[in-house]
Amino acid sequence: MYDNWEALKTECMQCRKCGLCETRTNLVFGVGNENAEVLFVGEGPGENEDLQGEPFVGRGGQLLDKFLTAVDLDRKKNIYIANIVKCRPPQNRDPKPEEQDACIDWLREQTRLMRPKIIVCLGRISAQKLISPDFKVTKQHGEFIEKGGILFMGTFHPAALLRNPLQKPDALEDFLALKKKIKEVCQRTY
Ligand code: SF4
């Protein structure tokens, strides 16, 4: 247990708890406002993220930023973004269950320090790890589920939207529902 972000980040940046440490360029700890009430969680860094050390910075990240802007959210101001695993799986394969299990404590500590009201899971891997192992994004996206005093919502991964642009209107609906929910449950002004 860590009592501040600096200590947590310092320790995490040296992590070698799973094999993904062998092939990473940079560990991608997370980015955003540590006092925000909304936490976004993706599955893991891709090539650009690994090179730059920041989550969602490639084409998928640019698309995510467009959706965020549409609902007055901004990774530099009022949200935090992290991933289930903090080091890039080779060739962008799905992180293995044992890699997710090895890494999840870092995210748990981030969540404990941040105390978000809402967690948005970006894509299947994140939603299945944090909401329910049988979560189906195409069926359950946009639904808010309360667990342990936090509202969880799963939506499409930006990379999936780049592959299947027909799902973009559904994703926008999810972000609009998120905006409404933020107004209901978040105390600070968004
Ligand atoms: S993926 Fe997570 S558990 Fe594995 S080495 Fe990186 S930080 Fe550590």
Image (tube, helix red, strand yellow):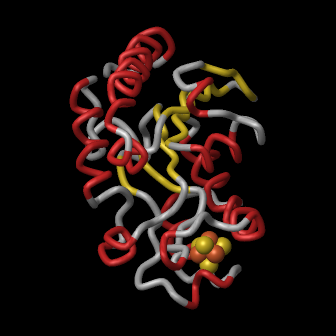
Query: What residue sits 32% from the left and 46% below the top?
Result: 162
| Residue drawn at point x = 33 percent, y = 22 percent | 169
119 lies above or below 179: below
Q: Quadrant of residue 35?
A: top left
In the orientation shown, which residue stands out farthest toward the bottom? 22
Q: Nearer the viewer, residue 39 or 155?
A: 155
Seen from the viewer's position, the closer of residues 149 and 134 is 134
Dividing the image into four quarters, tell me where ligand 1 lies.
bottom right
Please provide percent x and percent y for residue 108: 67, 52
Q: Residue at x 37, y 40 (%)?
A: 164
Q: Horizontal placement of 99 versus 13: left or right? A: right
Left or right: residue 171 compared with residue 152? left
Question: Residue 27's spot in the image, x, y percent?
Answer: 47, 75
Q: Quadrant of residue 114?
A: top right
Residue 145 picture location, percent across and down = 67, 21
Residue nearest the viewer, comparing 5 with 143: 143
Residue 184 x/y as whole percent: 47, 9
Q: Please tell me which residue is depicted at 63% across the width and 66% down the height of the picture.
A: 95
Which quadrant holds the C terminus? top left
Of the 4 image quadrants, the one containing the N terminus is bottom right
Whether 74 is drawn above or below 11: the answer is above
Tally of numbered tags:
0
